Image (spheres, grey):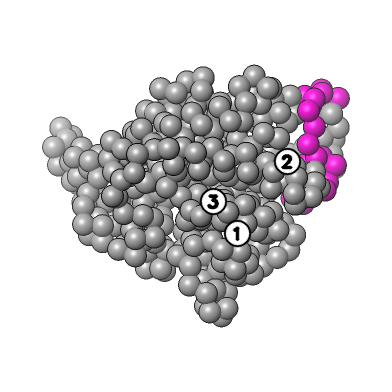
Amino acid sequence: MAPATNKKSLLERLADGPVIGDGGFVFELEKRGYVKAGPWTPEAAVENPEAVRQLHREFLRAGADVMQAFTFYASEDKLVNRGNNVGEKIGVDTINREAAKLAIEVAEEGGALTLGGICQCPSYLTGKNKVEVQGEFEKQIKVFEETGMDFLLCEYFEHIEEMEWAIESCRKSGKTVAATMCVGPEGDLHGVSVEECAVRMAKAGAHVVGVNCHFDPFVSLSAIKKMKEGLATAGLKPYLMCQPLAYHTPDASKQGFIDLPEFPFALEPRVLTRWEMQKFARQAFDMGVRYIGGCCGFQPYHIRALAEELSEERGKLPPASEKHMMWGGGLAMHTKPWVRARARQEYWQNVQPASGRPYCAAMSRSDRWGVTKGDEELKQKIESTTKEEVDKLVKMQVEKKGDCVVPCK
């Protein structure tokens, strides 16, 4: 077990004011060469612990109050799905345990909390029963209990039924449980409204509920607004949490950015600026969201923007602000006079960034396959996807959408 401390718990901190989460590990470590796009599994916690440790430290310096163990997609069934062999090569226990140790190590450097997270798994999408799916969750939860994680998070669930099973499993630990679904204002993939999703998460025992991933901050806040209304109608008062993407997604369909043709390797033109992140932080706080962080695409400077915007409410600035004057104030030291003229809030609040691509479309045409639990193409499979199977999927895509990458002429 990790040594006992007298630091405030998550619920105590949320009662005091906003808690800043960390940012996205999967996408950032893929860019740095430590995560494989496709399976998106976190074996880097074992293979390259220094990379994971460094990213934790960057988020801590940027103002994050929580170090989330890098355990996304670390259920055993995901670690052996579609040609992935890290489940056999390293193992579910080792990956989760080493990730937890790294989070604890860095958290102790700055008084941060630690969390262990679980997410949706292939067993559910394949159609396995509740006992089998919960068995996957419990392999991870056991490690989080043994290593002394401060609280647990059920995140990145597209179906409220599986989320309820996950919350039930986490509640057995006796720890505080947060729960976020990767859904937008339209609700889950079985057609359950976002309002009902929030109510069911709270009734299942989650102390904190909200959304993460799949949609940008402002679309996500639209979903949070509906969640808040549903919870109020039901007389429930869990804390609210929002950890969205760092990519603009006004054109995404029900499954979010995964449906966009730019996913995952051409999303950079959609990245929010630090100033847009400050706007998100303020809107989220004013809406009543108290756990505010980020998911895919969120880099340390984005987290710093959240912490700076809410510095008055938190009573402090993050260490990384030592090198960052608010609203571009440091530009007053620049050599070029026209750049010095940009050292003001009004300029950065109103700038409209260009892409630099003359023929770049403002929005894309989203894929809308609509597949969900039980669909043959989503079922768990040990073997790698063959070229023939990929060719079949390409044919299906052409039939559904036309062989077109936006912009189309």
Q: Is residue 109 visible?
A: yes
Tell me the residue that label 2 is attached to. Answer: 122
Question: Helix, strand or loop at disc 2?
Answer: helix
Of pointers 3 and 2, the one earlier in the residue sequence: 2
Q: Position of residue 262 (x, y in %)?
A: 61, 38
Residue 184: mark in rendering? 1
Residue type marked 1: Gly
| Rendering coords of residue 392 (x, y %) | 86, 32
Q: For this view, does 268 lie left or right of residue 352? A: right
Left or right: 305 as drawn, with respect to 251: left
Q: Position of residue 365 (x, y in %)?
A: 67, 48
Residue at image point 66% right, 30% down = 79
Residue type of the residue flagged with mark 3: Ser
Task: Residue 46: give x, y in percent of width and height.
Answer: 51, 23
**Residue hosting label 3:** 173
Q: Amino acid at mark 2?
A: Pro
Alpha carbon distance from label 3 to label 1? 29 Å
Secondary structure beneath disc 1? loop
- State the predominant SS element of the stretch in magenta: loop
